[in-house]
Image (spheres, rainbow, N blue to C red):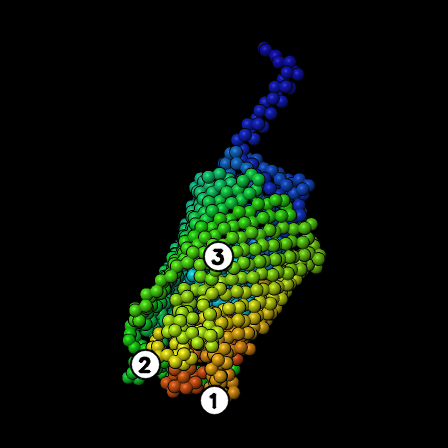
Amino acid sequence: MYCIPRRRARTCVWLAAVLSTTTLTAHAVIIRGSVRDPLGRAIPSARVQLIKGTQVVASTVTLPDGSYEIRSTEDGRFLLLANAQAFAVQVSEPFYGRSLDVVSRDLQMTINPVRSEVTVTATGVPTAIAQTSGSVTIIPMQDLSTRVDVTQELRLQPGVSMVQTGQYGGATSLFVRGGNSDANKVLIDDVPANDVGGVFDFGTVSSTAVRALESHRGPDSVLYGTDARAGVVRFETPHGTAIRPVLTYSGDAGNLHTWRNEATLSGTYGKADYYTAFSRFDTSNALANDRYHSATSAANLGYSFTGTTSIRGTVRNGVSATGLPGPYDFQGLTQVGKQGDQNTYMSGVIDDTRRSGWHNSFRYIGARKREQSQQFASNGTPDGFGTYYGKVVTIRGANGTSATGSAVVGYDPFPTRYELVSNRDGLDYRTDYKVNEHLTVIGGFRFQDERGSYRYPLFGTNQQVGRSNYDYTLQMQGSVGHRVFYTLGGAIQRNSLYGTEGQPQLGLAYYAIQPGTGWFHGTRLRVNFAKGVQEPNLSTQLSSLYAALQGINDTADIAKFRVSPIGAQRSRTYEGGVSQNIYSDRAILHLTYFHSTYGRGIEYVSTSLYNQYFNQTLPQALYGFYLNSLSTQGQGIEAELQYQMTHRLFVRAGYTYLDASVKQSFSTDALQALGGAATVNPKYAGVAIGVSSPLVGQRPFRRAPNTGFFVVQYTGNKFGAALKGAMSSRSDDSTFIDAFSSSTFDNSMLLPNRNLAYGFTKLDASVTYQWRPSIGVFTQAENLLNNQHIGAFGYPGLPLTVRVGLKVRFPAE
């Protein structure tokens, strides 16, 4: 038998070990990163496990500086699981890795969290809310699981008012901190979803294929350019994550001839991941001529070339149609009309991260939006001269005022139709580089080509307009000693309509008391300053009062009424607040003071007022005109409490006080220019009334001074339940029925604006039960108090609705 000397044998074993280690390293996927707490401090000795499917394929513990490195010879899709003493378990997002890849993944852990929340909207890169100075609310996917749309969940946050003109499918507006409803940037998979100029209707947005919804209160034109003048709302489509295909189905039905079906298919296959969804919703609503249906389809397809380079495409399409019954409380009847919307949002992005941590993304953005509105006939009473009037009604305001009469509901000829088209294509480049753990630099460039048209065949109108816009962004953010967190940035917007605008932003957060175990460990002080800008929408540009007066060579009135060309709308916000962790992070209290100004806002001048002011005789059926003349201010206090009472019971509640006022208004300017008296109702002599817009000193319309909400959620292994409420005080508004819109040709149907619109309390409840691993049942009840004043003044709200349904998942969870 041949023998190897002992020393030579030891040498061979050592060489074999080195060679095997070298081979393993050469063919391994390497995952590196750090594990830190919410303030970015290192967590040593944390256990990090690499999971593929349901198996742990590798594990390690973090070093004293919080860093870790894991290697695996397997390719595929992984996720990381981290746990450490005194911290809640943290699970990463799934990712793809292959041999020779070096993947960077940082994990953040929290102490017994109320909700572990990371924002992208407020900072541009994933950042723990605990490190930000802005005001952000995140609505998770499970909160939308029994909802038809997103409107009701958006009510459940501080600083906002949601106003819907009618019932399902009615135009729905979001007012943030006293700003206009079109002053919010809406992003769907980072594609600007607003009409050109900011208008966005939340009433047609289905809850289908919404993974998460972020709402950032405050201007953010630095990161998102024009239209982010009051806030930003961001939707994200889910990714496929399961190893095997997962098919889900949800179906329900309820009163008011309501039914809904939804199906999704998602999963992964090798380097690819996929998610697709489709839903259809139908209802008759509670008014005649007000049927509504919507169909939503969405897809999110991704492919990972390596663990650091990927490509992804998303598309979301919504098609809806609704009746146009009009303000029933003002007319006593419903109109015979229809509005159709077809909206498609597309994106394609190449994402790459270098080993140095330099991250780049190149994104194509596209939007196609069409809206058609038709009035087939009038149910009103004709006067023989081409005008139709509604029934004699008594309008009662929440302020105790009332008016009786009949209002104009239409003009000959019928049918009438208009069409509005708003298209957008663009390129968005984003880059960020983490210089060190205390400094990250973000830069970006955005180009957008915007095109739109407005067609009104009755008057031969066929207007088209286009814009080419450029944005440049630079922002720095980081921390000092893991106690002070800062954001400093600026942006330049080059808009083909209003020219060049620059927007700064500065935010600071300071932990006076750092988080930890105990009753009041974790006191964060926040201050934030930002400016925003907004481009006018296409209708505003095409119906400019300045252009109309120039068209009739009325330069005298241009000077007399201080009318200027349509231009940029601006905003400025200061805010400061404190966030207090309570009882080892089981509860968090947020208090915020904000002061916002909104300058050069768009104001509407009706055709009747245009004829009155400028001695013209345009047909009343013709739409009015716009100008930059409205300046408002809003200040107030937001309070929110989140409390994880038990492992299964979660409570959230909030309150907002808003003191908003008008500083400049065309209605007031016109009175001064004409030397006339303010519009009044003879029944309420001495009370000045803003007809189509508020007067100086009044509150802006439809911004309630007091709003609140609460959420109580129980989540068990099989059973779940939630009770949610949104409350609003009275707000200022108008009937908009002046002497030219009333059968008596006077102002007797105008009512004083102050507190005209009713306040309301809206209660919703849901119950879910997981009957089998793959089958669950649920019920969703909305407006339990059957309140009819939830909608805009004059538009009856949706009554009590109850839907019952089931959810099926194959294979089971």
Judged left or right of residue 754, residue 588 is right
Amino acid type, callout 3: Arg
Q: Residue at x 61, y 51 (%)?
A: 477
Indicate which label's residue lies in the foreground, 3 or 2. 3
How many residues crowd mark 2 within 10 Å: few (<14), some (14–19), many (20+)? many
**At label 2, which amino acid type do we have?**
Thr
Crowd class of label 1 (few under 14; some 14 to 19; many from 20; radius 10 Å): some
Q: Quadrant of residue 514?
A: bottom right
At 55% across and 74% down in the image, what residue appears?
663
The percent position of residue 426, horizontal first and vertical second, equals: 43, 52
Sequence-first disc among 1 and 2: 2
Residue at numbered disc 1: 683
Q: CA distance from mark 3 to mark 1?
A: 51 Å
Q: Quadrant of residue 806?
A: bottom left
The tag on residue 387 is 2
Between marks 3 and 1 in the image, the one whose residue lies nearer the viewer? 3
The circle on residue 497 is none
For marks 3 and 1 on the same chain, the one whose residue lies earlier in the sequence = 3
* 422 or 798: nearer the viewer: 422
Q: Which residue is mark 3?
A: 494
Q: Residues within 10 Å of mark 3 (few under 14, many from 20)?
A: some
* Alpha carbon distance from label 3 to label 2: 46 Å
Toward the viewer: 634 or 266?
A: 634
